[in-house]
Amino acid sequence: MGFDSRTELKTARVRRLFLVVVGAVFSSFVTAGSKYRVVILDTICHAPIQAMEQSAHRFCREFQACPDSLFDWAYLGLEEEKTEKEKTKESRDAIQLRYKDRTYDPKTLTGDVAIDIYVLGVRWWKDTHLGTHCKHVCSKTLPQISTSHMTATYSGSLLEGGNCIFELKALGPTTTQVHFTFDFTFGQMLALFISDKVWHNAIEWRFKVILENLVEFAETGDVKRKKK
């Protein structure tokens, strides 16, 4: 009887511990909610505002209509790392988007792209749709100010939405101030995966490279592949 009592007591403790762990995990999942992430960058483009404006417009248009073409200029430097090291969720290419079907209306500047989302090389989500709408506004006053604002909505609950905003201000005939904002609101499932370290290592750095490429295109008319 003594042995049975100890066994029952041990079993009860294990059950209580299991319930506490499950409860904690469930609680963290429920309370995590959506998570807002934003990248804000400021830089100077040594080119007329019209050149930087064209670069921003091209990025938005190709993002909506033919995102694969962005790899030829705007996405240079974002290539998958060639390494024998085991990839983790904190690797630069831990999260990848594979573009599929797409539609675009140039009159309304609206688009829709079907994407598969891969995590560590494994497809986690299939046929997630990214809908976009773009608006360009240019002031007629001096100093000239131009804004390109692309909003995004997502199917399912992975992402609740996002914004890509280019705010340009002419500082002179060949100098433009650039204020770039890119934000996401993640859904519950993805918010649990995107820690601060994952955000910095796997996502945030990409937008810095993209902005550098857009500025380079405005200044030179081309983007050269950087030496690593």
Image (spheres, grey):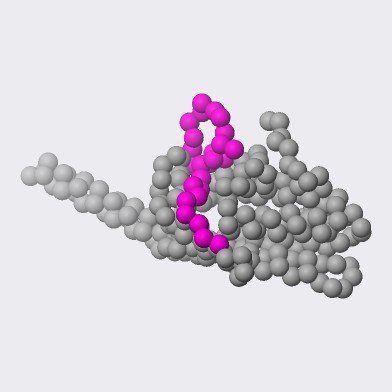
Q: Does the magenta stretch include residue 99?
A: yes
Q: Which residue is drawn at 57% across and 40% down?
A: 92
Q: Which residue is drawn at 15% across and 48% down?
A: 8
Q: Residue at x 19, y 47 (%)?
A: 11
Q: In this view, does 218 lie above or below 142?
A: above
Query: Residue 114, image x and y in percent?
Result: 47, 56
| Residue closest to the eye, 135 or 101 | 101
Give the quarter of the image for residue 132: bottom right
> Magenta: predominant secondary structure element?
loop
Q: Is residue 26 magenta?
A: no
Residue placed farthest to the top in the image?
A: 84
Q: Give the range drawn in magenta.
A: 79-104
Query: Residue 18, image x and y in percent?
Result: 28, 51
Q: How many labels does the image show?
A: 0
Residue placed farthest to the right in the image?
A: 172
Q: Which residue is drawn at 48% across and 31% down?
A: 86
Report the quarter where the C terminus lies. top right
| Residue closest to the eye, 64 or 1 | 64
Query: Residue 102, image x and y in percent?
Result: 50, 57
Give the quarter of the image for residue 155: bottom left
Query: Residue 222, image x and y in percent?
Result: 75, 43
Q: Can residue 32 be seen in this view?
A: no
Q: Is residue 87 visible?
A: yes
Report the quarter where the N terminus lies. top left
